[in-house]
Amino acid sequence: MTVGSLFHLARPEHDGVADAPLLGANEFGTQFGLLPREKIEVMVRRGMISSPEIEDAQFQPASLDLRLGPRAYRVRASFLPGKDFSVRERLDALRSADDEINLEGKGAVLERGCVYVIPLIEHLNLPDSISAIANPKSSTGRLDIFTRLITDNSDVFDRVARSYEGPLYAEVSPRSFSVRVRKGSKLNQIRFRRLNSQQLEGSDFGLKEKELRERHEKIPLVDSDLELRRGGLVLRVGLGAEPADGVIGYKAQKHADILDVDLTNYDLADYWVEVRARRDQRLILDPDEFYILASRERLQIPPDLAAEMVPIDPAMGEFRVHYAGFFDPGFGAGANNRPSARAVLEVRSYEVPFFLEDGQVIGRLVYEKMAEAPQLLYGASAVSNYQGQGLKLSKHFRMD
């Protein structure tokens, strides 16, 4: 099926959504790339995203927040359905009748260290020219809630194939804190990518280094020299004594109270231990401990681009830093086109203690073009919790 056939599809009925009106080019535009909020709203109106009463707060400049449904299922281990099975078929084989958890009303507690699969409220009915990618929300990653999207007949996490029609599921595993969730809680988000005919089978959508250098010369992407590697902007960890209070990170406490993901104003001292700068500007990561750190660089995302943090190279260290990797258009935009926000890093070491040094390479940002710039950029609304951030915990905690 060609991209042009997108405008001639009659959408089948799906979960109570009648055949969607034909999607005209005048509504969807002619550009390709990640879809802004305005086009995601078109997808909702056309039944490509079916969900009862989508909330305005779910729409972000370049993504849609997804909501937990009314039931969760505790499973023995993470899984993927594979090409020949639905998630429901695999789920029924992996759980018992006692593993169903009611998330209605006050919700339920998801225990630290356990794995849950939760059907989401939203369903998809994608045309042949649109695929999707998912990621934990920033606040989810900063709470160390490991969250991934699963779809039917798939052998990868966090990816939705073009033409996908069916339900969405979240795999959720709290790693540091037991958390309370309920129907409607938002833990992950989804981006939609409109493909041209040359991209239908592609997997690399990042901007090339030449274009990134040209962009940086016009409006700086970062407040330091541009360092690129494997098509992405290199980020380095900041462990120096720049903050006046000397705090360069936070380490999750082992035995903390239950945390409600829909509440705020928690005292950080009840959940976190401050990590202060050392004279040698080093930090030893303890095995299987969770840290919140920040990049040394300040950065900004241009209005017509979005970015995702990805691993710099698996061979460079036994730690993970990319739990929640989406950066929206407008993030970090400061006065006079100067980058204003640090990237917050969710870091976990594996197996052995690991030395980090100030300025050590810890990740990279891959930039991708938007189909068009969103009308409302990150930072222009009340839900932009991390604009201009330095070292910052999730929105759930008081930082004063």
Image: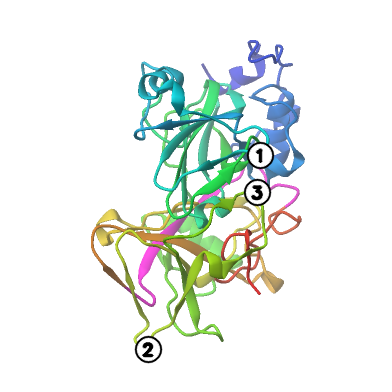
Q: Which mark is residue 106?
A: 1
The crowd level at tag 3 (other Cα within 10 Å; few <14, some 14-19, many 20+) is few
Residue at the image position 59 percent from the left and 42 percent from the top? 181
Residue type at numbered disc 3: Asp
How far is the residue under mark 1 from the one under mark 2? 47 Å
Residue 191: where, in percent of width, then height?
57, 39
- Mark found first going from the N terminus, 1 or 3: 1
- Mark found first going from the N terminus, 3 or 2: 3
The crowd level at tag 2 (other Cα within 10 Å; few <14, some 14-19, many 20+) is few
- Mark found first going from the N terminus, 1 or 2: 1
368 to 184, vertically: above or below? below
Residue type at numbered disc 1: Lys
Tell me the quarter of the picture where residue 361 sits.
bottom left
From the viewer's perspective, is the residue at label 3 or at label 2 nearer? 3
251 to 47, vertically: above or below? below
Tell me the quarter of the picture where residue 99 sits.
top left
Residue type at numbered disc 2: Arg
Residue 162: where, in percent of width, then height?
51, 25
Q: Is residue 367 highlighted in magenta? A: yes
Q: Is residue 371 highlighted in magenta? A: yes
Question: Is any part of residue 343 visible from this angle?
Answer: yes
Q: Which residues are magenta?
A: 356-376
Query: Which quarter of the rendering shows the C terminus?
Result: bottom right
Locate residue 185 relative to residue 144 in the image: left or right: right
Nearer to the camera, 380 or 253? 253
How far is the residue under mark 3 from the one under mark 2? 39 Å
> Which residue position is annotated with label 3?
262
